Amino acid sequence: MATPDQLMAKLQDEASSCYSWSNGPGDRYAPHSHGFEKVLYCVKGSITFVLEGEGRRLELKGGDRMVLAAGTVHSAVVGPDGCTCIEGRR
């Protein structure tokens, strides 16, 4: 599995305004969207995104990558061990 530094280097090659964030177990994000395409890597732990318009769930674990198109309404629930993610926009 790639290290956090390797994942950040990959992200910086494809996105701008890159940063890291973390949440504790069970934390939730209410449905929302962004005006930009989001590229996100789960670095540690797990988080499940719900694509509200599709009713689809995407569970990300360490090393997994997701791209969300601008305007995609999504919510999220952090897994039992918390999560650390990095993201950027393009």
Image (tube, rainbow, N blue to C red):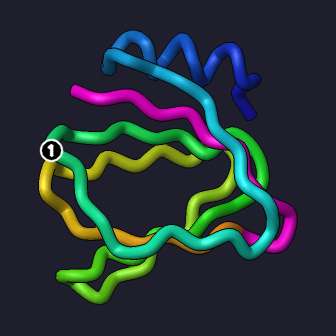
Tell me residue 38's x, y (percent).
30, 41
Q: Which quadrant, please, contains the N terminus?
A: top right
* Residue furthest bottom as drawn: 55
**Residue 34: x, y in percent?**
23, 49
Residue 37 occupies quadrant: top left
- Does the segment drawn in magenta span residue 74? no
The quadrant of the image that shows the C terminus is top left
Q: Quadrant of residue 21?
A: top right
Type of secondary structure dominating the magenta stretch: strand
Would residue 41 appear left or right of 62 to someone viewing this image? left
Asked whether residue 82 is drawn in magenta, I would say: yes
Q: Classify mark 1: helix, strand or loop.
A: loop
Q: Residue at x 13, y 57 (%)?
A: 71
Instruction: Give above or below for 22 relative to 83.
Output: above
Residue at image location 79% in from the left, 60% down from the top:
24
Residue at point 45% right, 20% down?
Answer: 18
Q: Amino acid at mark 1?
A: Gly
Q: Is residue 45 left or right of residue 51?
A: right
Residue 69 placement (x, y as % from top left):
17, 50
Q: Magenta residues, as a range? A: 79-90
Judging by the rendered image, the residue that carries numbered circle 1 is 35
Left or right of 58, for residue 86: right
